[in-house]
Amino acid sequence: MSYKTHTCGELRLEHAGRHVTLAGWVHRRRDHGGVIFIDLRDRFGLTQVVINPANVRSPEVFAQAEALRNEYVIQVEGVVAQRPAGMANPKLATGEIEVIAHDVTVLNPAKTPPFAIDDDGRNVDENLRLKYRYLDLRRERMARNLIIRHTFVKFIRDYLDARGFIEVETPILFKTTPEGARDYLVPSRVHPGCFYALPQSPQQLKQLLMVAGVERYFQIARCFRDEDQRADRQPEFTQLDLEMSFVDRDDVLNLIEGLFTEFTERYAHLHGKRLSFKPFPRLTYEEAMERFGSDKPDLRYGMELFDVTAETRGSEFLPFRVAHVKGICAAGCAGYTRKQADELTEFARRQGAKGLVVLWHDPDGIRNTGAGAKLSQAEKDGIVAKAGSKPGDLILLVADDDRRVVNTVLGELRHELGERLKLADDGVMAFAWIVDFPLFEWNAEENRWDPSHHMFTAPKDEHLPLLETDPGSVRSKQYDLVCNGYEVGGGSIRIHRRDVQERVMRLIGLEIEEARRKFGHLLEAFEYGAPPHGGIAPGIDRLTMLYCGEPNIREVMAFPKNQQAMDVMAGAPSPVYEQQLKELHIRLAL
RNA sequence: GGAGGCGUGGUGUAGAGGCCUAACACGCUGCCCUGUCAAGGCAGAGAACGCGGGUUCGAAUCCCGUCGCUUCCGCCA
């Protein structure tokens, strides 16, 4: 016999008169002395149960019902009834009906929970929530997040399956990689002194699957990186890992764009989100940096950077006697005090600027204070024109000889002001592609070129001749997917030709021998007929976080770790027994 | 490794040198109550204020140190 004939979310008016059995948790109890109302909760919803002495099978049943407390697990047998006139609860999906209990069985009593479960839990200390995660997940918000995540992943699997992709599992126990993030290591018992590494991503393996002829591979893949945590970073996280053969950049972009467009549109009613752009804008890296000061701009609002280098050429104002002057216009912020302006200046300094020029745009023009007092009228007019500012706005300018500093500082200011002014509509998903990244970046410390992504990223075809002559201007077939200011995915078309690979390795100062030691299996595989291929890896956690409207990825993971990378519920990591260490040939040096 | 924020009953907060033998809301316990749905009424239990030291006649409150959590920078090809 089943414990329940229906879930707590499905009974409607049409079920009136039906004899049903429900089971779940006591969500709330309202005891009126003579009659007791129980909001019974299971994963599917809430149903009001009415326990009336006149309707129960025996007085003992009512006595037992009086002893019910929150979170008791109970089973209720009774009849579905339309609620009396005027008693319907529009806040509940099942609010038209109630279940008149004949019998109530306590399947398991429960201790009083350490925190309330019938709210969203946002102001409960997170470590307490994590310690009792199994209770925390009972709250409606968290259950909803798990369901949205499931729906998302299910959609991905169906979407890719329909397009000829197959999901292939790759090893969790793999080999340490010298570059990139710190690895999580797993000691080998049978090979003393040797270690597996948990994959930072299945990058090499998916490329090998292309050599293997899989052609269209994906995996909902767990990835591990032993780096410090952030609101959007956990030591283990999940990527949609994907790789395709016989494709070029736009094939990958179009496929993925279709995936997120369709999911967002089809499931908008679930998570209350809509697309900002269709199709997704494609910004070059340079354009993103020049217009937004970031390679992962939040495109839910404007406030673009403007360039007043020409307008301030030859200025009497000393800070402007540099190579680049750009700014942003903070609309409606002319009410900022000197102190608030100083705070922004301090913020800009922390980001690497030498200072910040703040101009107040008053009804009669730029206020004659601070830098505003030192600029010529022509300069002010030029700046106002470029900024497109109106009276009531605040203009922020950064000047530096290094254009990257100007852009990134303004990008951070834009982000900061966007948050303060709440410019972003949290009902939208503003996806965009960032393309044409530099293939290399100059490593001043080591005095050499480093790959800005990884050494298997292909250069743009038309830039191949520049590899040796002008490495800094070579653009790659790397692309990032960004959304609402987050990098939510990155990938590239890979190098599949040996001669190109060797030219790249030479350029980054990697000897063939060294490369063989580090990536021998991959390089060897490429000699056996590697197809042209490329892929991408969207972050499932970050995307789910955005779809759920959550501020951090822990809210969309069932059992996340805290900032110290600890599982506070289970108490991991933990010391191990001496005997375990001995078997692993490990001696601690603490 | 660095910077900021926070740490007071079960939960969330108040408190700004003596009015604190620590207040409020929710929760909890008991009693009353047959139509509530954030039920209501009455009564009650529950914290020496993260920890250690210092200043002071007097510290939850000021100072120093320390621990924990969190956000950000570094880091994350």
Image: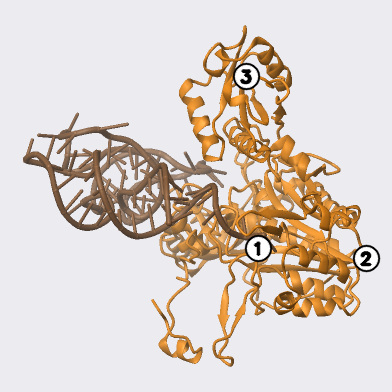
Chain colours: A orange, B brown
Which label number is shown at residue A246? 2
Which chain is mark 3 on?
A: A
Q: Earlier in the sequence, mark 1 or mark 2?
A: 1
Task: Please give the name of the residue rendered at 66% of the width and 46% of the height, measured from the top-left corner.
Answer: A96
Q: Is residue A205 visible?
A: yes
A497, above or below A332, in the image: below
A222, above or below A269, in the image: below
Tell me which amino acid carries mark 1: Val
Gap in angstroms between the C-alphas marked 3 and 2: 52 Å
Which label number is shown at residue A20? 1
* Badge nearest the viewer, 3 or 1: 3
User: Are discs 3 and 1 located on one and the same chain?
Assistant: yes
- Please identify the residue farthest to the right as the structure is shown: A246
B65, above or below A238, in the image: above
Quarter of the figure that contains the N terminus of chain A: bottom right
User: Does A523 sit left or right of A188 as displayed?
Assistant: right
Q: Position of residue A125 (x, y in %)?
A: 44, 52
Which label number is shown at residue A393? 3
Q: Position of residue A112 (x, y in %)?
A: 41, 60
Q: Nearer the viewer, residue A206 or A117?
A: A206
